[in-house]
Image: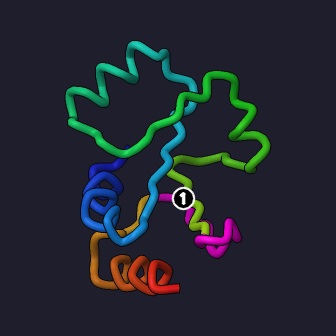
Amino acid sequence: MPSTIEQLHREFKDQGLTVLAINLGEERDTLAGWLKSRNITSTVLLEPTGAVAKSYGIAYTPTVFLVDRDGKLVGKCIGVRPWTGDKGRALLRLLLAR
């Protein structure tokens, strides 16, 4: 998980942003150690079978899905994006204001 996602989680969680990261294929102990060593506070789900990646059409990581408060998919981004930049933060603020 990019540190930028964790940074945004910490910055916007009180405004309603929820980050759900899905780890594809790591062993539980490996993932737990990695999360602890980096002080990750957002929710990371373990997905060892690949079923989620297949059902959501995830071929590359990172893949980010933006879902609004009503559960509607409003965006999908493949690859690294400057989420902590001005445009990324503005997009998140706009979505959170809805």
Q: Which residues are magenta?
A: 68-79
The residue lying at 49 percent from left, 15 percent from top is 27
At which x and y percent is residue 54? 76, 40
At which x and y percent is residue 34? 30, 26
Q: Is residue 93 left or right of residue 47?
A: left
Q: Is residue 44 magenta?
A: no
At which x and y percent is residue 16? 42, 67
User: How many discs mark residues in the rendered view?
Assistant: 1
Tag 1's secondary structure?
A: strand
Q: Is residue 92 left or right of residue 64?
A: left
20 versus 77 height, above or below: above
Dot 1 surroundings within 10 Å: few (below 14), some, or many (20 or more)? some
In the rendered image, which quarter contains the N terminus?
top left
At which x and y percent is residue 92? 42, 77
35 versus 86 height, above or below: above
Q: Is residue 42 left or right of residue 25?
A: left
The residue pinned by badge 1 equals 64
The residue lying at 33 percent from left, 78 percent from top is 89
Q: Is residue 75 magenta?
A: yes
Return the residue nearer the eye: 22 or 15.
15
The residue lying at 50 percent from left, 80 percent from top is 95
The residue lying at 42 percent from left, 60 percent from top is 80
Residue type, mark 1 in image:
Val
Return the residue nearer the eye: 3 or 8.
8
**Corner quadrant of residue 25:** top right
**Corner quadrant of residue 10:** bottom left
